[in-house]
Amino acid sequence: MKSNLIGYIKRKSLLYKTAVEYGDYTINHIQGCSHGCIYPCYAMLMARRFGKVATYEEWLRPKIVENAVELLTKEIPRHKTKIKFVHFCFSTDPFMYGYKEIEELSVKLIKMLNEAHIKCTALTKGCLPVELARLSDDNEFGITLVSLDEKFREKNEPFSASYKERIGCLYKLHKSGIKTWVSIEPYPTPNIIQQDFDDILNAISFVDKIIFGKMNYNAMVSKYAGYKEYFNLLSEKVINFCRKNNKIYHIKEGTITK
């Protein structure tokens, strides 16, 4: 059943190779994102630049690619031998908070890829459904987490899942034996929010991988004296934490300054 809270569009293709540094192939089966992040959101900036949405309000109204299953059915055989893994998603959120129809489509697409023996990864500011634990053990599921302060979330990620909910859903998958990860990006400087970085690391100490990256496209970052040294220090903390606890890590390009 189609929801009146969601729009629908058709596309000519779905699965494509990405240039994102830690990506391979990706799928963006939704246009827009209801989470409304105001860091600002790079995905929204690009959508406006290329005329896909005109306003922030339009971006908040997600549109499902209604022929996504049909497209993926055709494209899996075409790309299968070239794919290392498929990421959900780089320009939207596959588990948009409060949108069951989007969640169900995301799970269906991941299942289709797994049945073709293709690994999937996913990242969300919503809640990862427990159904993911019944799919391939090769999959990796993650959340974005840049703070534990709910007031910060309500201001900067106003319609996303609470940090506690995100961590809780991720932990359930971890307990089910699924590989989990956290993207601590875009991380803010102390003039945006005062917080203890170690608290965040300790809150997600159960995950298998951590990605860390600085906040971009925000003038407040460069106004913080010593921001380059600050991100160097935090990058070092992530590296040391992961090495000590036998975890994989990735520091985003441009986060460490020589």
Image: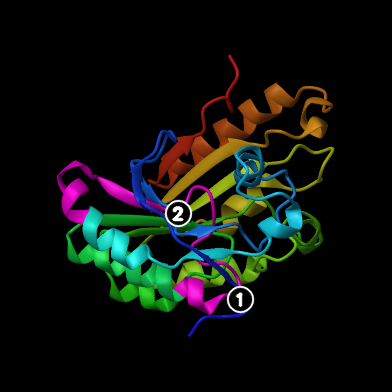
Picture coordinates of residue 117 (x, y %)?
17, 59
Residue extending farthest top: 258
Number of labelled discs? Answer: 2
Sequence-earlier tag: 1 or 2: 2
Picture quarter containing residue 178?
A: bottom left
Towards the viewer: 196 or 183 = 183
Picture coordinates of residue 223 (x, y %)?
84, 26
Q: With 236 as the anchor, is 174 left or right in this view?
A: left
Instruction: Tell me the SS state at disc 1.
Output: loop
What residue sits 66% from the left and 53% below the top? 199
Picture coordinates of residue 9 (x, y %)?
50, 62
What range is drawn magenta here? 76-103
**In front: mark 1 or mark 2?**
2
Q: Amino acid at mark 1?
A: Gly
Residue 113 to residue 243: above or below: below
What residue sits 28% from the left and 49% below the top? 85
What label does residue 98 carry, if any?
Answer: 1
Q: CA distance from mark 1 to mark 2?
A: 18 Å
Towards the viewer: 109 or 61 = 61
Picture quarter containing residue 21?
A: top left
Answer few, some or many: residues within 10 Å of disc 2's Cα (few below 14, many 20 plus, some between 14 and 19).
many
Instruction: Tell me the SS state at disc 2.
Output: loop
Specify whether residue 48 is painted magenta. Answer: no
Picture coordinates of residue 4 (x, y %)?
62, 79
What label does residue 28 carry, if any?
Answer: 2
Residue 25 to residue 154: above or below: above
Picture quarter containing residue 189?
A: top right
Residue 242 to residue 7: above or below: above
